[in-house]
């Protein structure tokens, strides 16, 4: 199918959906379905192929595509996210980005989407406050989006204090939020050891998240054996924590 459309229509979009269905890889569908809990039906298309499809769509009329876009299949939602991620006009990007957030219902769509936001690469300072504000949301995957964007684009000295403060103000206790926090703090430790240790000493994060942070630091190839032994000494006594 020609994905570079000058104008998308309902008929063209239906042709596109049939094209997606034709790319189904059953073994990948079975594998990915075990890793991902989602309300969307999974066709079974590998992510590099989805990224390539989105790239081709972006060579044509992106906005008419987004107007016709549906959210029945998992792949429809993820490719839509990849297309939005390529928008470089700030106001349009923020509008579509905000409307996309409620569609995210699993870690895979969240993380795949957040890793390829073109506008953030070009204008990080202008968008920092917006992404930081997502950590105050009530929705699990909206918060995770904010955390993963910070992790991907904002582990810089000038942003650290604001990031640490925002983490401490998160009100939602969720496995997918807590694991993302641990991932973010591990990355901060690797790049800014002393500042991150100072934060960890006084942080308000729960014991589960704190200890997951320690575990991720210890698992990292970028951390010395001596540092791993030291952070192990900081580990808190475990508390029962349910995945939700």
Image (spheres, rainbow, N blue to C red):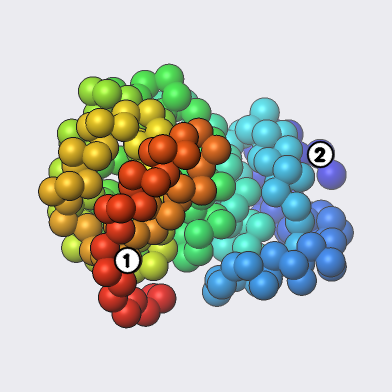
Mark 1 lies on a secondary structure that is helix
As rendered, which of 12 and 72 lies closer to the eye?
Answer: 72
Label of residue 208 in the image: 1
Which label belongs to residue 2?
2
Residue 235 showing in the rendered view: yes
Left or right of 223: which side holds 191? Answer: left
For residue 171, the mark is: none
Residue 171 picture location, percent across and down: 19, 63
Q: Is residue 227 above or below residue 175?
A: above
Q: For the residues carrying marks 1 and 2, which lies nearer the camera in this image?
A: 1
Q: CA distance from mark 1 to mark 2?
A: 49 Å
For residue 59, above or below residue 66: above
Find the residue positioned furthest to the top.
122
Earlier along the polypeptide chain: callout 1 or callout 2? Answer: 2
Residue 219 screen position, x and y as percent: 51, 48
Q: Label 1 neighbourhood size at 10 Å, few (<14), some (14-19), many (20+)?
A: many
Taking depth in this image into account, of 210 and 94 the one nearest to the observer is 210
In the visual, does 115 lie left or right of 230?
Answer: right
Q: Nearer the viewer, residue 83 or 5?
A: 83
Task: Left or right? Give the position of 18 relative to 197.
Answer: right
Residue 1 relative to residue 191: left or right: right
């Amino acid at each position: 199918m020609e994905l570079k459309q000058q104008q998308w229509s309902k008929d063209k979009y239906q042709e596109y959906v049939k094209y997606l269905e034709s790319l189904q890889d059953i073994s990948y569908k079975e594998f990915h379905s075990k890793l991902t809990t989602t309300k969307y039906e999974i066709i079974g298309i590998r992510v590099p192929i989805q990224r390539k499809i989105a790239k081709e769509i972006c060579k044509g009329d992106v906005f008419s595509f987004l107007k016709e876009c549906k959210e029945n299949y998992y792949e429809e939602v993820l490719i839509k996210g990849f297309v939005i991620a390529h928008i470089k006009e700030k106001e349009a990007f923020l509008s579509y980005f905000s409307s996309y957030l409620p569609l995210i219902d699993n870690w895979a769509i969240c993380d795949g989407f957040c890793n390829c936001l073109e506008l953030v690469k070009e204008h990080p300072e202008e968008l920092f406050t917006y992404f930081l504000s997502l950590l105050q949301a009530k929705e699990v995957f909206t918060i995770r989006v904010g955390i993963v964007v910070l992790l991907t684009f904002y582990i810089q000295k000038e942003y650290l204090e604001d990031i640490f403060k925002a983490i401490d103000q998160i009100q939602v206790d969720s496995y997918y939020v807590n694991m993302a926090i641990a991932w973010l703090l591990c990355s901060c430790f690797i790049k800014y050891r002393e500042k991150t240790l100072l934060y960890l000493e006084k942080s308000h994060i729960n014991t589960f998240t704190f200890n997951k942070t320690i575990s991720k630091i210890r698992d990292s190839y970028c951390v010395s054996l001596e540092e791993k032994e030291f952070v192990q000494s900081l580990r808190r006594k475990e508390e029962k924590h349910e995945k939700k």
